[in-house]
Image (cartoon, rainbow, N blue to C red):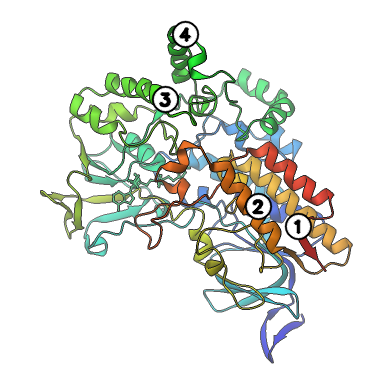
Amino acid sequence: MALVVDNGKSVGNAPFDVIVIGAGIAGLYQLYRLREIGLSVRVFETGGGLGGTWYWNRYPGARFDSESYTYGYSFSEELLAEWNWSEHFAAQPETLRYLNHVADRFDLRRDIQFDACVVSAVFDDAQRQWTVMLDTGERFSARFLVTAIGPLSAHTLPRIPGVESFRGQAFHTSRWPSEPVDFTGRKVAVIGTGATGVQVIQTIASQVGELTVFQRTPNWCTPLHNRPITEDEQRTIKAGYPQMFELLRRTPGCYIHNTDPRGTFEVTPEEREAFWEKLYAEPGFSIWMANFRDVLTDPKANALFSDFVARKIRQRVKDPVVAEMLIPKCHGFGTRRVPQETRYYEAYNLPHVRLVDTRRTPIDRITESGIRTSVTDHAFDMIVYATGFDAVLGAFERIEFRGPDGSSLKDHWREGPKTYLGLMSAGFPNLLTIVGPHNASTRCNIPRCIEQNVDWVAGLIRDARDRGITRVEATAGAEAEWTHHVQGLAEGMLYAQVDSWLTGINSNVEGRDVRRILQYQGGAPAYRARCDEVAANGYAGMTLS
Ligand code: NA7
């Protein structure tokens, strides 16, 4: 095999057409599509197995909030026909089995290199190719580089002194061990009450000896209403796939739920209450996605609905002091990610479950034996860090991307991401950032937006190959226009006025204290239309040579 030579030094085997970073849902499907058009592809995956999110997040209680059958890949009728989801909202082991099944069925593994962590990627303009370096020092080159690194993959431990000093067991939820963890009789602390913390807490509460939850900010959690899929439902789901995917193409977030066209104050108080009761009894995200059209934009509508959910929390939590601690006071419903729960609030009615408000009694440090707050020392056998991710940007910053003039992507995005279609950045040719910032995918039933991103990127690379084009790059003007457009779409949205990972805030990471517009808020149909228009117009906004 020919060697690529760089300044007289061998840098690896013959270049691939495309290198993909990440073997999660996006990377697997990108590999499938690129191989289908006859390209040589190598996927590098940090994990020891495939699945991305579903490989790493194997903590107790991890499961979908999207209906299972809306989440699976849609590209293969045979796959849709043969796979039976067992529950309306499948748990992590089933999803990981599904992704492994997909990889085997389409023979994807042979192009994936596991335990391969990419640390840098440098573009050589003379060769018109990227060279990526792994943490082992090995280097590989390709004409195109596709990042499929996920918006929630760079996990973060809390910036609290003493994290390394704890002598008991400690796990971040996104680095959960593969062997079973026994909670029986143990004193367990959970730090964090986001979507992950909620799933962990409700699952382990009945297994532990004692559970202490350290909550900094409560979230508005609503019932998931999960249940098994019956045989009749299975048949109906499979027969209805074409219509369902058609519906998902029309809704803003590619969920089966669509915004109610009515305004909150256009109906009588009785109608409103009945509608909200109905939503509260419905499965999944309908309460967030199919609510009145103004609940996420009009502060008065939002406050009224937040009051409704607060009443539910008060009804479900026996101790009124604890109930008040669990009701968010500094942000309205749906302005942060809504955790979906199953008897989460009832967990706080158990005698061995305690809630600590870390705003009132901050965590001073982690000690050898547990957690020291401003008022006392708590002893634990185990600490679970459900402290989340350096969302959207973190995974990009953990790899050093350098364009042809040596400038880094991190510097280019220092004041916030600058992209074209959330898929490219000016100054970084042949780099395609699927599911990256400013892309519809981070506000989406993610596999649906992943499929759109991947198909678009595969189309671009195929067209480039067919036309003998070896370099594609977003223009600075197109990047500025798209970035401005994305920022404008977020104006007036209540979520943009609140701290959370959706706005890029993370107290555990230096510099993540300024809110950023990270997501495209125009809805997946408009995003898809714009991407299609760009392609149809000969990749307007890009230079191709
Ligand atoms: P999230 O939603 O970012 O939640 C992290 C939680 O950890 C949240 O409650 C944080 O409180 C808390 N946290 C983080 N750092 C600290 C420190 N230093 N001290 C106390 N508490 C802390 O991550 P998840 O994993 O739950 O969910 C991420 C997404 O994955 C989720 O939205 C789904 O889409 C899938 P805070 O709210 O910042 O006050």
Q: Amino acid at mark 3?
A: Lys
Which residue is pictured at 13% across the width and 51% down the height? 374
**Marks 2 and 4 in Cβ contact (< 8 Å):** no
| Callout 3: SS | helix
Q: Crowding at label 1, few (<14), some or many (≥20) Cα neighbours within 10 Å?
A: many
Disc with the residue nearer the chain's start (3 vs 1): 3
Q: Amino acid at mark 2?
A: Trp
**Marks 1 and 2 in Cβ contact (< 8 Å):** yes
Which label belongs to residue 482?
2
- x and y percentages locating residue 386 in the rendered image: 35, 48
Q: Crowding at label 4, few (<14), some or many (≥20) Cα neighbours within 10 Å?
A: few
Q: Is residue 233 left or right of residue 33?
A: left
Which label belongs to residue 268?
4
**Residue carrying label 1:** 541
Q: Residue furthest left?
A: 376
Rendered image quadrant of residue 349:
top left
Disc with the residue nearer the chain's start (1 vs 4): 4
Disc 1 to disc 4, how far (Cα)? Answer: 49 Å
